[in-house]
Image: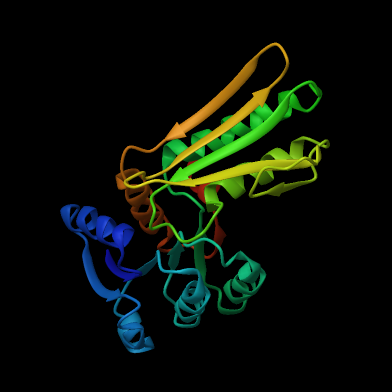
Amino acid sequence: MKIALLGYGRMGKTIEGIALEGGHEVVLRITSDNQQELTPERLRQAEVAIDFSIPSTAFDNIKMCLENGVPVVSGTTAWLDKMPEAKALVDRHKGAFFYASNYSVGVNLFFAINRYLANLMATQEQYEVKMTEVHHTQKLDAPSGTAISLAEDILRKLNRKQSWVNDNSNNPSDLEIISKREEGVPGTHLVQYISAVDQIEIQHTAHSREGFAKGALLAAEWLIGRQGYFEMKDMLGF
């Protein structure tokens, strides 16, 4: 594949390393310092774009890709208020767009387990549910996109919870997400169900960024030749 990397921070560089090892070619690298180099002409040199930029530029990057017929994979979070516009662009330009808050296959298995457990807990009102997410100190958004995905799946199953909050709360209808930032932590997500007599926990801990990068490359390979909006469940089948 000929790849345009839109965002060349830690994740972008990890993706590049794995891509080059796999025989792929990176034809464009865009950072916050050379955003002006993202032109239609340069972008169209790529067969697919992978966006791990920042929230303020993600939508514009995706828009340019779709307008220029370049399939785009995005893992940038905290811009999703514009997702309806992005999906409309997919339809208008008959483009291809793949979005995930987390590209790790393990995390997506964790999503499925979380949905199943939440479904079981829907009638077990004696259990209070709480979440914790821990990431490296360079992560800009809180809570993480992965934590939000987990929380929204829980909210769809548990009627006793109405919304998530990124703090401690005395409101029983709030789902608490506690965010911690620690040096060198790729990502840990913990969901706890706590009663007076016991506690049930599920946790996913990433050991490196490689799982995320490999998943994003897998999505990029899968997306080429397709048309529409896709998520990990479409590629993985669960």
Q: Is residue 210 visible?
A: yes
* Colour setting: rainbow
Residue closest to the eye, 186 or 8: 186
Whether 103 is drawn above or below 114: the answer is below
- Residue occupying image coordinates x 37% and y 69%: 49
- Residue occupying image coordinates x 58% and y 34%: 112
- Residue occupying image coordinates x 23% and y 57%: 19
As drawn, which residue projects farthest toward the top? 197
Whether 84 is drawn above or below 162: the answer is below
**Quadrant in which the C terminus is drawn:** top right
Whether 169 is drawn above or below 110: the answer is below
Q: Is residue 237 visible?
A: no
Q: Position of residue 226 (x, y in %)?
A: 48, 62
- In the image: residue 35, left or right of residue 191: left
**Quadrant in which the N terminus is drawn:** bottom left
Q: Position of residue 144 (x, y in %)?
A: 52, 51
- Would you identify the image quadrant in which residue 39 lies? bottom left
Q: How many marks?
A: 0
Residue closest to the eye, 129 or 229: 129
Q: Position of residue 37 (x, y in %)?
A: 31, 86
- Residue occupying image coordinates x 32% and y 57%: 11
- In the image: residue 127, left or right of residue 21: right
Q: Position of residue 45 (x, y in %)?
A: 29, 79
- Would you identify the image quadrant in which residue 14 lies? bottom left
